[in-house]
Amino acid sequence: MSTALPFSLDKVIGALMIGSWVNSILYVLEWVEVYRYYQIGSKDSIFSKLTVGAALAVDTVSVAANYGIVYGYCVTYWGEPSYIFFTNGALYLYVITTGVTAFITQTWLIFRCMRATKQYIVSILMALTAGAALAGCIITTFLIIKYPSAEERHRVINSVTLWLVASACVDVAVAMTLLWQLRTMTRTSAFQETRSVITRISRITLQTGTLTSLLAVIVLVTFLADKASNVTIMFGYILNRCYTLTLLYNLNLRSRIVVHGSDANSGGLPGHGHGNRPQTRPYTTPCQIESLGGIHVHRTAIVRIDEGTGAEDTEYNVDAVSTRPSSVQTKDLSTSVL
């Protein structure tokens, strides 16, 4: 006699396992980025260092909760269909840590956005929206504890909607504010190579800024479509890690945005291609700083002497060093990337 289950194991347990696998991969990547950050960010502010440490600590608790949820379904209560219809205790911890991680990342991004754009009123509104998202998360956690049955998940619709919609709005708002600032910088820049750098940063801003907002919308839609399944939790696992990776990617981006301003370097003068390059002797002329809306790009001329022929290259880089010329207040160009 067949014993058909009143639910799909794929949606209840399978979704959790897939989410757990992806979550583990992203968590390892997170540690790699944290290690990289503490290598290149030794002179960063205490605020940034504490933000990274707090995000990693919260995410470690979140990963433990993730494993606890899967272990409960697959080991401790395996073969007990009634357990499927009640909320796993570790889920409470997962929900609250997801909201806290998002709030930490968004607070840091809003602060950096305010410094880069000087849009104080907009930044305050974004901070209030981020606070509303955290409040929605806390209310959701409380309601899940009070109503653990899957049949009562409809009670959290309003709080979940507030949480995820507000969170998505903050992500989009920060991205759009920075894009507006970058577009202004592009119009006022006198150098083509600098405009190329800004265009590249704009593209990265749009990509990373919309990723977390898109995932938040997916989590909300999957929850509203099927409240009894755990598909929404699967996407939630990914959303949690993506917030912290967004934070770390911003901090580590300064080591990646180094644009050599002549594409001619790869195919112009003899001995300056990507193939076998003869020995050269670099000489650096004093750097030129271009101020763009409060964000400064260093323009450095480098002269290499190759077989008696001098060739001048131009290098554009992001100022990420704490020791800066006293006459010029500089800001990291990486602050403009989500």
Image (spheres, rainbow, N blue to C red):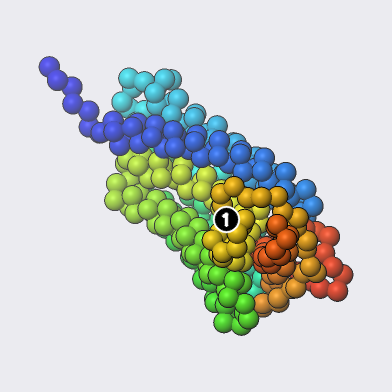
Binning the other alpha carbons within 10 Å of mark 1 as few (below 14), some (14 to 19) or many (20 upward) gives: some
Q: Is residue 33 left or right of residue 175?
A: right
Residue at figure coordinates x 67%, y 40% from the top left? 35
Nearest the camera: 180 or 91?
A: 180
Whether residue 79 is visible to the viewer of this picture, yes or no, is yes
Q: Position of residue 299 (x, y in %)?
A: 70, 69
- The N terminus, quarter of image: top left
Disc 1 target residue: 273
Question: Is residue 310 depicted above or below 247 in this figure?
Answer: below
Indicate left or right for 69 with 269 as reference. Answer: left
Q: Position of residue 155 (x, y in %)?
A: 39, 50
Relative height, residue 288 to residue 49 (above, below): below
Residue 54 visible in this rendered orientation of the protein: no
Closer to the camera, 184 or 12? 184
In the picture, measured across the screen, residue 223 lies left or right of residue 60, that is left
Q: Residue 181 occupies which quadrant of the picture?
A: bottom right
Residue found at the far front of this picture: 308
Q: Amino acid at mark 1?
A: Gly
In the rendered image, the residue lying farthest to the top is 1
| Residue 212 x/y as whole percent | 48, 55
* Residue at the image position 30 percent from the left and 37 percent from the top: 11
What residue sits 38% from the left and 34% below the top?
A: 18
SS state under label 1: loop
Position of the C terminus by quadrant = bottom right
Count of numbered marks: 1
**Which residue is at the far left?**
1
